[in-house]
Image (tube, helix red, strand yellow):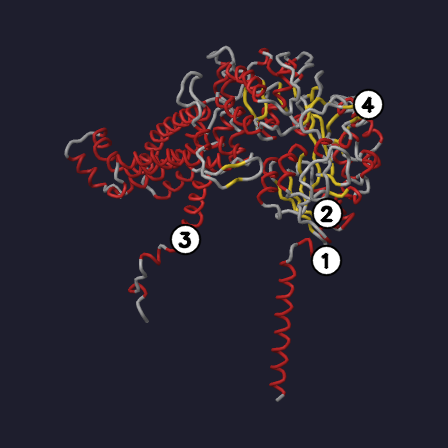
Amino acid sequence: MKKNITRRNMLKTSTAAVGAVAGAGLLKGFPAIHAADAPVIRYLGTAVNMGDAVQKRLFDDTGIKVKFIVKTTDEVVKTIFTQPNSFDIVDSEYFSMPKLVPSGNLLGMDTKRIKEWDNVTSAFTKGEVAGKKIGDQGTAPKKVMYLKGSSSKEFASEPTQHVTLIPTVYNADTLGIRPDLIKRPISTWAELLNPEFKGKASILNIPSIGIMDAAMVVESMGEYKYPDKGNMTKKEIDLTMKIFTEAKKAGQFRAFWSDFNESVNLMASGEVVIQSMWSPAITAVRTKGIPCVYQPLKEGYRAWAAGFGLPATTKGRQADICYEFINWYLSGWVGAYLNRQGYYSAVIPTAKKYMKSYEWDYWMLGKPATADIMSPEGKKLASKGEIRDGGSYEARMGSVECWNATMDENKYMVRKWNEMIAS
Amino acid sequence: MPNLFKIKPSVGLLSLPYSLVFIFFFFIPLVLTFIISFWDYNEYSIIPDLILENYKYIFENCFSFENGMCVTFKTYLSTFMFCLLTWFFTLIIGFFVAYFLAFYVNSLTWQIALFLLCTIPFWTSNVIRMISWIPLLGRNGLVNDFFLSTGLTSAPQEWLLYSGFSVVLAFVHLYTLFMIVPIFNSMMRIDKSIIEAAYDSGANGFQILWNIIIPLCKPGIVIGSIFVITVVMGDFITIGIMGGQQIPSIGKIIYVEMSYLQLPAAAANAVILLLLTLLIIWIMTKMIDIRKEL
């Protein structure tokens, strides 16, 4: 008898144990974001500006964890189209919006839920820097910022409550040069095709961005004045590509690059002395101890801007967590982190609180450094006395000429670009 | 206890697992690719349809030569050139390496050790390997340093890197192994007594090589050639990096089209590439009946 009871008890307990294990397994099977403890956000993006430090700080401040789904710019767009439920939040660029919004895969973001919305820089909301209008050729953020409603597939021309992306980071891009190998001042985009640099120039082989750099060059050579570089007609595309095809045939380019690291290697090895480049690539060359300048040019900069979007299906607690994450992102610590990498934070006043005054003076005001300037990883970027290339925020962002763009004739443009590569 | 070796499962059952993998992950995607190549598309979606636009677009301006050759022809021509050169050099080098391994190295240990040596190019990642050509072939690289210091040339040679030369060099460096393995395999199966008999009958070294070894290595040569040619036909990473992104490749065109969501156009290009590659392989198998030889 006694034996029997024991056996029965044994059975009971073990069944319960199995049940508990199974139950736990089931709970874990739910989308991570619904789990009551330590919510995890699946973050789709290029993640070029998201280091380990950001994740750690995020967890300490909010208890939210981030799982990165790292892809290239074009692949991010493709993922939004083809797997719109594979992520919780997406870090995308504004120039993808004309393609993405009509698909209805993204949610109109509610600006009322963003604490710092009123402090978002006017470069995004009005296309102004320090009260002065900046260039808006191409897909300028203000053109594709506002929606007619939370599930609208159309852009609104006037500010509304719902936006496509909550702005996070942006910058003004220009040409990178090796001053030690060029040995003279460079002041115009036209220098990219100057025969003096035959076999020592490069441009990026990403058609949608490369075409903008190409247009800046063509215009500064005085060949043509585009009504809108970011939305060329077929004729304008032909003209631009003809000039670049001729230059390519004449051996102007050492190579084209499509990967960030390739641009760093081309520059650091001296194979190339002038090329289209991105800000962190300049930093990477410099931290090797090789002089490299992000050269301000008289025609202005080509700007880009990115922000956070949510899948159209987001609601309830998942939305709460994502908005909490975005509010944390804009609350200053990340802003300072981005500013220190040479980008700009979408909310400047909060970032200022987390930067030392000498850092602020160097990065944002364009003053000579009063102490060595360090990257967020602790590597030295500039010595005492140096000035940031291009100077202050107002000088750099104020001279934006055009923005990364998606053209109406995109298909034709990609094709012509391929022809240029094949020539 | 039944003798397990007496149970003979049908051939169909044995080949079932591989057939399923083949059907689901190769055959069905291929059929889909073919179907989608006739669809229409816009900026953000693909539209079921039955149109020939994607194919017309590939061959647009290809049959009037007023403005020179069209992009598609130019791209295939350059790809064929790379195929031919890579095939030629990997065959010559691969054949003699295999010959050395099979006939001059007698201990199995050494054969294995030397084989491993041949796989060294595969020990590093593609990107690192490509980048490390710069210090060797670059403008300030070792080769140019040597040329300049010995007075062979008066200026750095630019054709060493980001050129057709560097692309072929990288291909040969990488894919010679694909030739060595099947040729070595064929050679190991040659009965040594045939060679001895030829030698005894008075054949010289060259006659043995030409009349006995090469004919008996044909299956290995064809298999190696198929490997090399199919890999080079579809490549875009090596051509991209070693050619400085200035040399076109079909793979790159497909890649760009896919990243702009022009999937039907990419599918049409893929179908043409597949047909051409199959055509080349068909011609090669016509020259030698692999099944018979194996």
Mark-to-mark CA distance, 4 and 2? 37 Å
The tag on residue B61 is none
Asked which secondary structure carries label 3, the reply is helix
Q: Quadrant of residue B224?
A: top left
Q: Quadrant of residue B33?
A: top left
Residue with the mark numbered 1: A36
Both labels 1 and 3 in a single chain? no
Residue with the mark numbered 3: B20
Give the residue type at disc 3. Answer: Leu
Asked which secondary structure carries label 4, the reply is loop
Residue with the mark numbered 2: A322
Question: Do tag 1 and tag 4 residues touch (Cβ < 8 Å)?
Answer: no
When the figure is inspected, residue A285 is found, relative to residue A184, above or below; the finding is below
Q: In this rendered view, identify the residue nearer to me: B108 or B265.
A: B265
- From the top left corner, tell me how far across and down residue A194 is, in percent: 60, 12
Q: Name the subunit of mark 4.
A: A
User: Along the horizontal axis of the image, is B291 left or right of A308?
Assistant: left
Residue with the mark numbered 4: A367
Question: Do tag 1 and tag 3 residues touch (Cβ < 8 Å)?
Answer: no
**Is residue B124 visible in the rendered structure shown here?**
no
